[in-house]
Amino acid sequence: MDTTLTAALQREARPLETAEDFEFLLECIGDATLVQLGEATHGTREFYRLRADISKRLIVDKGFDAIAVEADWPDALRVSRYVQHMGDDMSADQALSGFKRFPQWMWRNHETVDLVNWLRLHNLHVASPARRCGFYGLDLYSLEQSMHAVIAYLEQADPEAAARARERYSCIDHFAEDPQRYGYATSFGMKPHCEEAVLRQLVDMNRKANEHLRTGMVPDEFFYAQQNARVTRNAEVYYRAMFRGRDESWNVRDSHMAETLQALREHIGQGIGRPARIVVWAHKSHLGDARATEMGEHGQLNLGQLVRERYRPQDSFLLGFTTHAGSVTAASDWDGPAELKPVVPSRPDSVERLLHEVGMPVFLLPLRGRGSALARVDGRLLERAIGVIYRPDTERLSHYFHADAARQFDALIHVDRTTALTPLERSALWQHEEPAETYPSGL
C-alpha cells in the first residue's frame, strides 16, 4: 500500500474508545433524522454492539423515535409491542421467538436480546405511548404471515372487508408457504399471477387510511395492517421478479424498504407532530449508495441511494462498517445451519486492507465534506460484503465488488479484528469463542 496514503488516513482516523470519541461521531451525524448503519456482515458481534450503542445515543441524546431493521414486518412488530409495553410476551427471548425463518441467528442472538431489554427499560420512563421508541421491520419475505395478519385485523374491525381480503388472497394463499414456487409457476405460465388481487387489497387499505387522515390520524393497529397489505403486494411482485434476474428482484426489495421507511416516518410523525427520527440497521450493500458501486453501474439501486435521492442532504447520514479479519457467524448454503467461520484476511487491493494498514483496532473515518484521502485513491478498490452465507473458498467472486467508499458513505467505522455473533440456538458447527479485545470500553 502507498505509505503516503496510509499516513494521510492515520491523520484523519479518529479512535473509538471512549464516550468522548462517540461525541465526535454524533457531531458528524449532526441534525440527520435518518441515520443508516450498514454492517459488513450479518454475523459480527462488534457490528451489532456498535450499532446498538450508536442507536442508544441517538435515542437518548437526539430524541430518535424508532429503529428500523432488515427484518420482516410481523416479526419485528412483535418485538416493538414488547419494548413499548404492549402485547403478551414476558421476556425479550419470547418477543424474538417470531424469528423462525432462516437466518434465525440474525435477530435471535445475545446482542439483540440486550438491545431489546434496553429499549423496554428506556420506554418504561417515557410517559406518552406515542413517544416510546419502536422496533420495526423493513423487509418483504413474510408473505404468508402478512396476508394472515391483514385478515386477522379486518375480522375484528370490519368482517365484510375481511371476507373480501380472504377472497383476494385465496389466489396466492396455497403458495404462501413456498412463495418461490408461486414465482416459478407464474413466471413460466403454469399459473395466472395474483398481482391485481393483492394490489386491490392494498388500494382498499390505502383508501381507508385516507379516510382516517381526514378525521384525525391513522390508528396504529390499522397502520400495522396496512403495512402488512403493502408487504403482501410487494412480496408478490418480488417473487415473480426472482425469475427475471437478480437486479430486478433486488430493486423491488430495496424499493419496498424505502417505501416502508417513508410510511413509518410519516405515521410516527403524525403522533408526535414532526417527522420521525429513525435509525436504520441493514447490510451495507443496502445502505451504501449503490451509485458508487459496480452493482449500481449494472442497474441496481438500494435503500441508501433512495434515501439520498428523496430527502435533503442534511436529513440522512450513511455510516458503513468494515473489518480486516477475525470470525463470523454465517451459513455455507441457504437454509443451512449457523457456523462459526474464520474470516479470511482482506485482499491487498481492497479498502479493508487499506484501513487495516492504518494500524488502529477500532476507528471512525469521517468522509462527508472532509476531502478524505480515501477519495483520492488511484484506481478502484474492492470492498467486501459477507451476508448470511460466507464462502471463503470463492471469496473474490462471492464477496467482493468494486466501489468508491468515499462516495458510498458519509463515514466509515473500521474494526480490524472482529468476532462471530453468538446465536441463541447454536448448531453443532458453532463453537464458543471469546470476544475480541478491540471493542470500545469507554461507552
Image: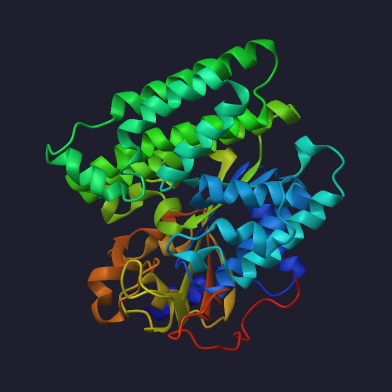
Q: Quarter-wise, where is residue 41 in the image?
A: bottom left
Closer-to-camera residue (305/232): 232
Image quarter where the C terminus lies is bottom right
Q: Position of residue 269 (x, y in %)?
A: 67, 30
Residue 30 visible in the picture: no
What residue lies at 63% left-to-right and 86% top-to-bottom? 437
Residue farthest along the left direction in this orientation: 189
Q: Residue at x 49, y 77 (%)?
A: 7
Image height check: is 198 above or below 243?
Answer: above
Residue 49, above or below 183? below
* Percent position of residue 374, x then y: 43, 64
Q: Is residue 285 visible?
A: yes
For residue 15, side relative to residue 386 (left or right): right
- The percent position of residue 343, horizontal first and vertical second, equals 40, 82
Along the viewing direction, whichever of 318 and 115 lies nearer the viewer: 115
Q: Quadrant of residue 277?
A: top right
* Apparent side of residue 17 relative to residue 61 in the rendered image (left or right): left
Q: Residue at x 58, y 50 (%)?
A: 76
Residue in the image at 50% along x and 36% along y = 228
Which of 149/347 is in front?
A: 149
Quarter holding the N terminus is bottom left
Tell me residue 107's x, y (percent): 55, 63
Q: Is residue 298 left or right of residue 225?
A: left
Q: Nearer the viewer, residue 384 or 314?
A: 384
